[in-house]
């Protein structure tokens, strides 16, 4: 009503001529959602492609706004100057659209473990790469951090050996307990249970040196755990099973979270079987994630899960599949601050090209913005797009191939930075990365900013960074031509060796030097 009275001339012109002219200035103060709805209504009069096609869509969009107007107003108000000059900003909760059922099931698993007085529980989360398996688990597990539950996190990595990650994770857990100097009754009881289970097991303490420090209340040591497996592998598996059983209690329930199980070694899979079939272990659960497109009936993990089911142990399966078309439309609507009906033509194309894979949807939206196919128009106060150009975009069905092609368009030095970072693993240190590149024009800080802005990497600690997804690390690694990979690994290790001091080598760089030089030799031998 106020808008009409603010500009009677516009209103009269619109009635007499049956076509819109320039809109009243009052509209500029409205939230983007309402502004876009009104301008689309006006555009409908001239049968513009940016307008509504039917009254039903208008009603649905108004209904959505009316369901929670205060929330929508806050959501859609923003600094337009920052929108114009910055990349498209995606909300942190975008990754969980269409995942409420899976999030609820994962939360139920954690809650059940905390009060479970009987045998061990297990849940496995499966889905294709980029579907949001690990993201969903990470969202739920953040709600359970603290002394009420001990979370042992293990992530297997395609680029590193899997046979030491479990002992490394346990070593880190006990190192944290030593560092925090927590003398709670629960930890004292844990010490007693571990001491009762073991007298002096050299092999166990060699594998997890911080365990001995924890039990003796000594000072921190930085021994690296040896490889899990070998001649005494079965004995170590048995001791690890007893150790986890001794840690878990009603005071400190334990969840063993195993990510990317498709890359787990046989020793770890055997240990999972032992843990799940031990009725004496209580207040304990195993939560695993794996890519179902990489696990067929011949895969050892498939055999393990079947054996657990046949033995009657509690095993729940949670599938994370592609999101529905309407979920993609909600993502586009909330990101662009536009009514859902106006976004449907765009979101339909995005859903089709990304296959409903959430990671692909997010990266495709970002790429459209960077290529200029999706831009914010100050004059119309809304995001606009060229649908025909977007339809003609050639997109590989393989996310890794698509991301590698995107990286290929970046400056050469940035590509070299990505290749080197990929060789350093899923996590890397900025100072170590700087020592791997010989070109004096390479600036680590600038590279890291480009990587973060593009959504390729994220800061995980002081000077430490991680890939936002292992598929993105794989895409960065694929920038290295296959015929040059052995020499690239070897030269990277050689550069680190030459540029590191003795102190740095002992503290940080030695593993990366040996790992990359070994991979260079191994690849050459394989060829």
Image (cartoon, rainbow, N blue to C red):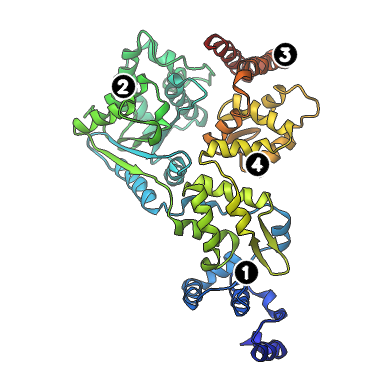
The residue mark sitting in front, 1 or 3, is 1
Q: Is residue 283 visible?
A: no
Cα separation, mark 1 vs mark 2, equals 56 Å
The quadrant of the image that shows the C terminus is top right
Residue under label 2: 270
Q: What x and y, as percent, mark residue 372?
A: 69, 53
SS for dot 1: helix
| Image marks 1 and 3: residues in contact by CB distance under 8 Å | no
The vertical placement of 404 against 517, above or below, is: below
Q: Is disc 2 placed on a helix, strand or loop?
A: helix
Q: Which residue is mark 1?
A: 32
Whether residues under marks 3 and 4 lie with C-beta atoms below 8 angstroms apart, the answer is no
Q: Position of residue 272 (x, y in %)?
A: 31, 26
Q: Is residue 437 left or right of residue 103?
A: right
Q: Nearer the viewer, residue 284 or 433?
A: 433
Q: In the picture provided, is 285 more to the left or to the right than 346?
A: left
Mark 4 or mark 1, which has the lower sequence index? Answer: 1
Q: How far separated are the C-alphas under marks 1 and 3? A: 56 Å
Task: Find disc 3 in the rendering and name its residue.
Answer: 498
Of label 1 and label 2, which has the lower sequence position? 1
In the displayed image of the protein, which residue is found farthest to the right? 440
Return the mark for residue 452.
4
- x and y, in percent, of residue 63 in the image: 47, 74
- Residue found at x 65% / y 37%: 407
State how far apart marks 4 and 2 are (Cα).
Answer: 39 Å
Q: Residue at x 45, y 23 (%)?
A: 165
Mark 1 or mark 2, whichever is nearer to me: 1
């Amino acid at each position: 009503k106020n808008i009409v009275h603010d500009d009677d001339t516009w209103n009269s012109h619109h009635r007499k001529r049956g076509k819109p002219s320039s809109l009243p200035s009052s509209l500029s103060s409205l939230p983007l959602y309402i502004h876009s709805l009104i301008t689309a209504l006006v555009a409908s009069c001239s049968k513009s492609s940016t307008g509504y096609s039917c009254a039903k869509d208008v009603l649905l969009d108004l209904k959505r706004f009316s369901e929670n107007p205060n929330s929508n107003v806050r959501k859609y108000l923003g600094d337009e100057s920052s929108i114009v000059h910055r990349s498209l900003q995606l909300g942190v909760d975008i990754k969980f659209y269409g995942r409420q059922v899976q999030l609820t099931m994962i939360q139920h698993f954690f809650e059940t473990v905390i009060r479970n007085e009987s045998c061990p529980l297990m849940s496995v989360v499966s889905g294709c790469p980029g579907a949001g398996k690990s993201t969903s688990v990470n969202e739920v597990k953040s709600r359970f951090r603290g002394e009420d539950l001990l979370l042992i996190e293990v992530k297997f990595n395609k680029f590193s050996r899997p046979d030491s990650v479990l002992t490394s994770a346990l070593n880190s857990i006990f190192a944290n307990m030593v560092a925090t100097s927590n003398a709670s009754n629960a930890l004292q009881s844990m010490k007693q249970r571990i001491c009762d289970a073991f007298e002096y097991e050299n092999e166990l303490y060699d594998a997890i040196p911080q365990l001995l420090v924890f039990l003796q209340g000594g000072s921190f040591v930085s021994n690296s755990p040896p490889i899990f497996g070998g001649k005494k592998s079965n004995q170590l598996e048995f001791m690890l099973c007893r150790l986890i059983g001794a840690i878990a209690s009603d005071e400190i329930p334990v969840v063993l979270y195993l990510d990317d199980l498709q890359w787990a070694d046989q020793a770890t899979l055997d240990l999972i079987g032992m843990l799940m079939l031990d009725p004496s272990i209580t207040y304990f659960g195993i939560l695993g994630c794996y890519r179902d497109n990489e696990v067929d009936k011949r895969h050892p993990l498939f055999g393990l899960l079947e054996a657990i089911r046949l033995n009657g142990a509690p095993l729940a399966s949670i599938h994370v599949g592609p999101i529905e078309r309407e979920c993609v439309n909600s993502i586009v609507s909330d990101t662009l601050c536009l009514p859902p009906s106006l976004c449907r033509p765009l979101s339909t194309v995005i859903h089709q090209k990304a296959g409903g894979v959430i990671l692909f949807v997010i990266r495709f939206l970002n790429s459209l913005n960077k290529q200029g196919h999706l831009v914010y128009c100050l004059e119309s106060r809304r995001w606009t797009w060229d649908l025909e150009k977007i339809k003609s975009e050639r997109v590989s069905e393989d996310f890794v191939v698509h991301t590698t092609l995107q990286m290929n368009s970046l400056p050469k030095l940035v590509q070299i930075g990505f290749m080197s970072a990929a060789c350093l693993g899923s996590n890397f240190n900025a100072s170590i990365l700087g020592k791997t590149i010989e070109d004096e024009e390479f600036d680590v800080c600038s590279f890291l900013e480009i990587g973060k802005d593009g959504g390729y990497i994220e800061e995980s600690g002081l000077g430490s960074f991680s890939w936002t997804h292992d598929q993105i690390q794989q895409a960065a690694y694929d920038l290295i031509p296959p015929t040059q990979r052995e020499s690239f690994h070897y030269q990277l290790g050689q550069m680190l060796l030459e540029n590191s001091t003795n102190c740095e080598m002992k503290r940080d760089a030695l593993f990366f030097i040996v790992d990359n030089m070994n991979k260079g030799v191994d690849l050459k031998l394989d060829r």
